[in-house]
Image (cartoon, helix red, strand yellow):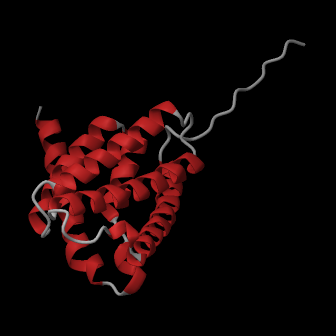
Amino acid sequence: MIKSIGQLFFLALSCLAIAILQFSFISSFPGAFNQINIGLIAMVFILFFFGIKSAILFIFFFGSFMDIFSFQFFSFHLLVLATVSLVVYLILENWLTNKSLYSFWVLCLIASVTYGFISSILLFVFSGLGGGFSIFSLYFWQSLLYQSLWLLLVASLFFNIFVSLAKRFKPFFLEKKGVI
């Protein structure tokens, strides 16, 4: 019981640190560098390696902190991250059979595109349908491209580090024992 409370507390502190890092540090970068979405990277990473239960806890804490810090309507990030994780989870469970780097790249690309489309649709709907639809702007496609490229780059780095450190994902070979 105390161990699980400690794990939840550590997860909440980690989500708070990631949200603060996203809003105070990464969003101030110039150009394409401010399109790094470390929350989305962490969510796909947790979903891929640790499962849906851990991802739901991460989405709850991280989405809540992002909603507190952002200027969008409250629960915007919770809705977007929950929708993205549902799409990614369904694709991971139904179509992708192994946990390879290529599967991870596919999930990251799907997560990035889904995040971009769902967030722009929600912003369009909740702005009263008065503004322009951001999917038709060049900035939307540029930011989607940059976010996808950053996500793939960081995903490749974290995937290789995690696989080299985790015993569960190391390949094993069966020895043939022949009878002579």
Spot the residue most to the bottom.
Answer: 30
Q: Residue at x 36, y 61 (%)?
A: 116
Residue 100 in sight here: yes
Q: Where residue 129 sits: x, y (%)?
A: 20, 63
Q: Where residue 36 sits: x, y (%)?
A: 37, 71
Q: Where residue 94 sits: x, y (%)?
A: 49, 31
Q: Residue at x 21, y 50 (%)?
A: 79
Left or right: 23 with respect to 39?
left
- In the image, 148 versus 177, the foreground residue is 148
58, above or below 93, in the image? below
Q: Residue at x 25, y 70 (%)?
A: 22
Q: Residue at x 19, y 44 (%)?
A: 7
Report the number of numbered marks. Answer: 0
Q: Where residue 77 sits: x, y (%)?
A: 21, 57
Left or right: 161 with respect to 65?
right
Spot the residue most to the front.
Answer: 130
